[in-house]
């Protein structure tokens, strides 16, 4: 990746992760002009379109992400939410159902908190790049390296958990997400992902409890409302 494109990817991802979707969109669009094969960027663009009310464009982005990485759980579930809102209930159910399927830290403890955080985020970015092209085992290693430096970074730990899940390591993913729930019970992104992962493990009642918790905290969360509706008869 050339320096210009990498700059757009880093800046776009930072804006996206902070919820500044309007600012993230032009940067991520620039990345896709050069690299149409980044599944995670298509997924981010899908979320941006969806949150802006462009559900059809969101569908197209999520479909492209899944074409690149059929095991991309988050993109599949995002797509099912879009299909549901478009009235494509059978497609939504089909996609929703299809988803069913340490090293020594050395002298790192001597680093100050700023340096540790900076390096941890670099490992996260590398992990995101690996995950974006479907190299899950490499991504997992990078997220674990990040957490060796900053074990309290729940956003990175959540990313580790979702990558473990997409790599088929469901029990390990659940363990990570439960640990986040115990340390940061109000961190709703992890509670949502815990629900999804419990659902993947056929633990439907527990999954619904997580999504219900999120809805109690944020009644406007459309995704959790759809997940609860789709699992009513499970």
Image (cartoon, rainbow, N blue to C red):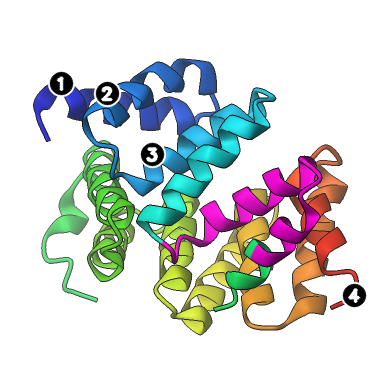
Left or right: residue 205 compared with residue 49: right
Label ID, residue 76: none
Which of disc 2 and disc 3 is earlier in sequence?
2
- Separation (CA) of disc 3 from disc 1: 16 Å
Disc 2: which residue: 8
Report whether residue 187 is seen: no
Distance CA(mark 1)–CA(mark 2): 7 Å
Task: Calculate the distance from the C-alpha at mark 4 to the C-alpha at mark 2.
Answer: 44 Å
Say which element carries label 4: loop
Residue identified by numbered label 4: 233
For the N terminus, the image quarter is top left
Closer to the camera in the image, 234 or 214: 234
- Please indicate whether residue 12 sits to the left or right of residue 179 in the image: left
* Sequence-earlier tag: 1 or 4: 1
Q: Position of residue 215 (x, y in %)?
A: 83, 49
| Residue 128 against residue 100 in the figure, above or below | above
First along the sequence among labels 4 and 2: 2
The residue positioned 63% from the left and 82% from the top of the image is: 201
Would you say residue 69 is visible in this rendering?
Answer: yes
Span colored in magenta: 70-94
Q: CA distance from mark 3 to mark 2?
A: 11 Å
For the residues labelled 4 and 3, the Cα–Cα distance comes to 34 Å
The residue identified by callout 3 is: 41
| Cα distance in 3D space between marks 1 and 4 | 49 Å
């Amino acid at each position: 990746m050339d320096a210009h494109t990498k700059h757009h990817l880093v800046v776009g991802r930072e804006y996206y992760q902070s919820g500044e979707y309007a600012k993230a969109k032009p940067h991520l669009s620039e990345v896709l002009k050069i690299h149409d094969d980044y599944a995670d960027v298509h997924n981010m663009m899908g979320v941006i379109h969806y949150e802006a009310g462009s559900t059809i464009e969101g569908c197209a982005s999520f479909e492209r992400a899944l074409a690149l990485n059929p095991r991309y759980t988050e993109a599949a579930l995002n797509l099912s939410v879009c299909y549901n809102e478009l009235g494509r209930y059978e497609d939504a159910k089909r996609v929703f159902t299809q988803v069913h399927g340490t090293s020594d830290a050395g002298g790192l403890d001597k680093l100050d908190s700023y340096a540790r955080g900076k390096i941890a985020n670099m490992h996260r970015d590398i992990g995101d790049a690996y995950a974006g092209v479907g190299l899950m085992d490499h991504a997992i290693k990078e997220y674990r390296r990040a957490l060796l430096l900053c074990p309290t970074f729940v956003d990175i730990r959540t990313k580790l958990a979702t990558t473990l899940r997409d790599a088929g390591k469901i029990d390990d993913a659940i363990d990570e997400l439960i640990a986040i729930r115990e340390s940061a019970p109000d961190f709703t992104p992890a509670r949502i992902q815990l629900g999804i992962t419990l659902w993947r493990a056929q633990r439907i009642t527990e999954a619904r409890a997580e999504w219900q918790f999120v809805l109690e905290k944020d009644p406007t969360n459309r995704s959790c409302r759809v997940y609860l509706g789709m699992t009513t008869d499970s």
